[in-house]
Image (tube, grey):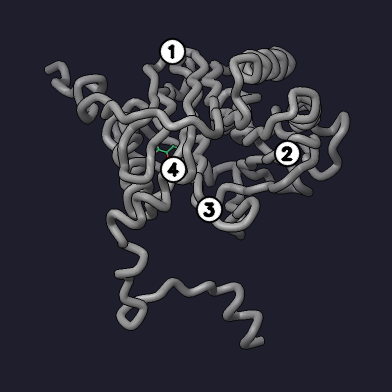
Amino acid sequence: MASAFDPEKARVPPALQLPKPPVTKASHADPSMTADKERNIAHARKAIEDAAGKGAQLVVLPEIWNSPYSNDSFPVHAEDIDAGGDASPSTAMLSEAAHRLQITIIGGSIPERCGDRLYNTCCVFGKDGKLRAKHRKIHLFDIDIPGKITFMESKTLTAGENPTIVDTGAHLLCYPGAFNMTTGPLHWELLQRARAADNQLYVATCSPARDTSASYTAWGHSTLVGPFGEVLATTEHEETIIIAEIDYSLIELRRTNLPLLKQRRGDLYQLVDVQRLNSVLN
Ligand SMILES: NC(=O)CC(=O)C(=O)O
């Protein structure tokens, strides 16, 4: 019997209409990926240039944008980011584009080779073209829903060890992600709205566009969510560039409206920084 599950119909209701306060213009480029790395780099460069041409000051690329999202492709497309230059043409392009266009780029992620290990790594470049942060995905994506989706990033990738915060304080959580046709309709928007509402900050996600001929079919739907969990901008699953404005002053307003941070019960529960704790104990 055919499944009655229709991913498109399983989505939550459409975006809330909120006033758009002017501040940072952010853009999510949503490119589709092929096995041709040079083509993927040229394609991403063009999307970044188009977004900057439309006024974006911050551009976010999707997860694994220089390679197909597959365990066979990760080793083939991996780059030695620390060595840079010819050893990492993808991040060299991001650095050059950030500097030339005077924008910040959150470079989605690419497979990174470091010694005999591979990581799923996101690089952030500032307007001066300098690397501001390098984040290795900590929670690898392993899923096994027989008949729907089975994918084990842990087959080829190693998990990163550290959270990454760029600048001081987080006002925007950026998730370059490649959810699929099962987790996409169920979790993609739900998780980003939940994290935005929990923490009263902005959440931006950027997915590869959907390619139904690929071995892993991405959900798409790159989105920007505001500090009340409201969807400020989103798209469907085709390749596109979404531009939206981020007014960081809205965070303070929402935290005053609904003072969740002040109501935290540190006497009952706390976040523990295990690395710091260990460094003090040892
Ligand atoms: N690539 C991913 O990390 C996908 C993911 O997390 C999902 O739930 O789908």
Give whichever of discs 3 and 2 has the lower sequence position: 2
Looking at numbered disc 1 in the image, what kind of residue is underneath it?
Answer: Glu
Q: Residues within 10 Å of mark 4 (few under 14, many from 20)?
A: many
* Distance CA(mark 3)–CA(mark 2): 16 Å
The residue tagged with tag 1: helix, strand or loop? loop
Please report whichever mark, 1 or 4, sits nearer to the chain's N-terminal start: 4
In the picture, the quarter occupied by the C terminus is bottom right
Instruction: Please name the amino acid that badge 4 sits on.
Output: Tyr
* Discs 2/1, front: 2
Q: Residue at x 76, y 47 (%)?
A: 114
Q: Are marks 1 and 3 in contact (CB under 8 Å)?
A: no
Between the residue at mark 1 and the residue at mark 4, the CA separation in whole angstroms equals 23 Å
In this orientation, which residue lies closer to the viewer: 216 or 101?
101
- Of the residues shown, which amino acid type is indicated by label 3? Ala
Q: Secondary structure at mark 2?
A: loop
Q: Tell me the residue that label 3 is attached to.
A: 170
Q: Earlier in the sequence, mark 3 or mark 4?
A: 3
